[in-house]
Image (cartoon, rainbow, N blue to C red):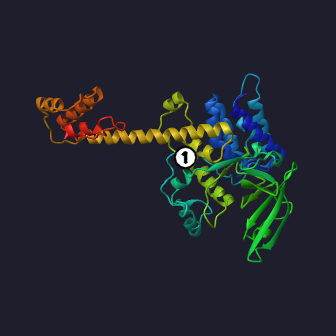
């Protein structure tokens, strides 16, 4: 069964368990449409089937509970058809008519965004918050979209405490079981200590001169802590770790959490929320400069999907694909820039210099040693460039002692 079908069934099953409250996905089921639609089509599902399911998901928020139940049943029936997925009968599960029907949301149109727009267009970003983002170099929508995580925390692959080793850089998930602050160094400094437990063992955490930690950490809090493991009195400890409260409902469902570089006055949770708002709106509307035929031939992910997945990946596999696509873009566009520079350079005219071959041979014969074939080849290329009528744009490269100086001297 196609991964796109399995993923949609997972969302719909969770929605049933939540009694059709439209919160199986943060923001509503319609938020999965852009990513799921692309994946379904790439999995080879019929366009008519995909379109009918998308229409149901678009209408879902305007349905009452009974209509939502019917809509999910219809989608499941369509996906579980013995001879393969069939289009959903929209008429059977359409929302009940009301005197003032709710306008149906339209699928996003590409090119309907301005990536140079200021970050204040993102919901929840005030001028004050924009000033904080500016310290991270985030001034426009494009800056936010391309502000990639510095690492990812995969909750499904985190090591338990009893398997941690000295010197590791790790992220650990656990529960705070104790926290206290005490004076040290004769009262000149303060040490805040906490004990983290995950059922397999405990890990001591410590912060110097950060007494406010005691007010933000409470017994029973579920948190993730990140840092380097040290040793004190034969026990593993983590000094000055980063701490983040475990989010009960993530912005995505894979358990792979992006972690960004921060500045003062903004937390991981706040920055992650801002980036999610930007990516959620912009990614489906991104115009991909690569034709679909080239993307399919090179097995490259759509640009909008790649930008979404690099921030909020559905799995490690989609994250790898997104990184591959964005790395391709970087190298490809760099190469295009080099070729454009070469094209511009070739259009510029320059003075021609005729190199008298007889004179050059006389100078070579006067040398107390014969030139190597590589040195002669370099001289021939220099002579051709001087006679071409175009500016020379070359670098004479060679190992130490390979004879670059004599080639340069003869070239002048």
Can you give x and y, in whole percent of width and height, for residue 265 in the image? 63, 67
**Residue 236 image-quadrant placement:** bottom right
Point 81% across, 72% down: residue? 182
**Residue 115 visible, this angle:** yes
- Residue in the picture at 27% in, 40% down: 405
Q: Nearer the viewer, residue 170 or 109?
A: 170
Relative to the observer, which residue lies in front, 73 or 34?
34
Q: Position of residue 88 (x, y in %)?
A: 71, 34
Regarding residue 58, the answer to whether it shows in the image is: no
- Quadrant holding the C terminus: top left
Name the residue at the front extreme: 368
- Residue 58, image quadrant: top right
Q: Residue furthest top?
A: 83
Q: Quadrant of the N terminus?
A: top right
Return the residue nearer the eye: 266 or 233: 233
Q: Position of residue 313 (x, y in %)?
A: 66, 43
The residue nearer to you, when weighing 405 against 355, is 405
Which residue is label 1 attached to?
A: 285
The crowding category of the residue bearing disc 1, from other C-alpha atoms within 10 Å (few below 14, some 14 to 19, many at least 20), is some
């Amino acid at each position: 069964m196609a991964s796109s079908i399995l993923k949609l069934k997972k969302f719909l099953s969770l929605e049933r368990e939540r009694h059709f409250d439209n919160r199986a996905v943060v923001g509503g089921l319609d938020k999965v449409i852009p990513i799921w639609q692309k994946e379904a089509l790439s999995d080879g599902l019929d366009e008519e089937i995909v379109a009918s399911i998308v229409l149901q998901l678009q209408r879902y928020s305007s349905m009452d509970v009974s209509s939502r139940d019917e809509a999910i049943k219809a989608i499941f029936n369509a996906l579980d058809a013995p001879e393969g997925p069939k289009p959903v009968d929209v008429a059977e599960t359409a929302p009940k008519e009301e005197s003032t029907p709710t306008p149906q949301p339209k699928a996003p149109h590409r090119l309907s965004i301005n990536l140079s727009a200021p970050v204040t267009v993102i919901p929840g970003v005030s001028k004050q918050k924009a000033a904080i983002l500016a310290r991270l170099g985030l001034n426009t929508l494009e800056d936010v979209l391309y502000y990639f995580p510095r690492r990812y925390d995969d909750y499904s692959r985190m090591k338990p405490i009893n398997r941690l080793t000295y010197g590791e850089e790790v992220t650990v998930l656990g529960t705070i079981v104790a926290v206290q602050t005490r004076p040290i160094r004769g009262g000149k400094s303060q040490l805040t200590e906490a004990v983290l437990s995950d059922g397999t063992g405990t890990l001591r955490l410590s912060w110097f001169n950060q007494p406010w930690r005691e007010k933000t950490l409470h017994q029973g809090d579920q948190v993730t802590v990140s840092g380097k493991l040290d040793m004190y009195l034969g026990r593993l400890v983590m000094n000055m770790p980063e701490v983040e409260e475990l989010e009960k409902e993530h912005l995505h469902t894979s358990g792979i959490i992006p972690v960004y570089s921060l500045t003062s006055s903004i937390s991981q949770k706040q920055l992650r929320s801002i980036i999610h708002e930007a990516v959620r709106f912009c990614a489906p509307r991104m115009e991909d400069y690569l034709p679909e035929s080239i993307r399919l031939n090179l097995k490259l992910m759509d640009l909008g999907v790649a930008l979404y997945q690099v921030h909020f990946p559905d799995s490690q596999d989609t994250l790898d694909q997104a990184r591959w696509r964005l790395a391709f873009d970087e190298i490809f566009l760099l190469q295009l820039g080099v070729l454009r520079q070469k094209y511009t350079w070739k259009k510029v005219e320059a003075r021609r210099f005729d190199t008298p071959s007889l004179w050059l041979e006389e100078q070579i014969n006067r040398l107390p040693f014969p030139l190597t074939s590589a040195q002669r080849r370099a001289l021939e290329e220099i002579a051709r460039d001087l006679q071409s009528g175009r500016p020379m744009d070359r670098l004479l490269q060679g190992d130490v002692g390979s004879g670059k100086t004599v080639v340069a001297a003869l070239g002048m």
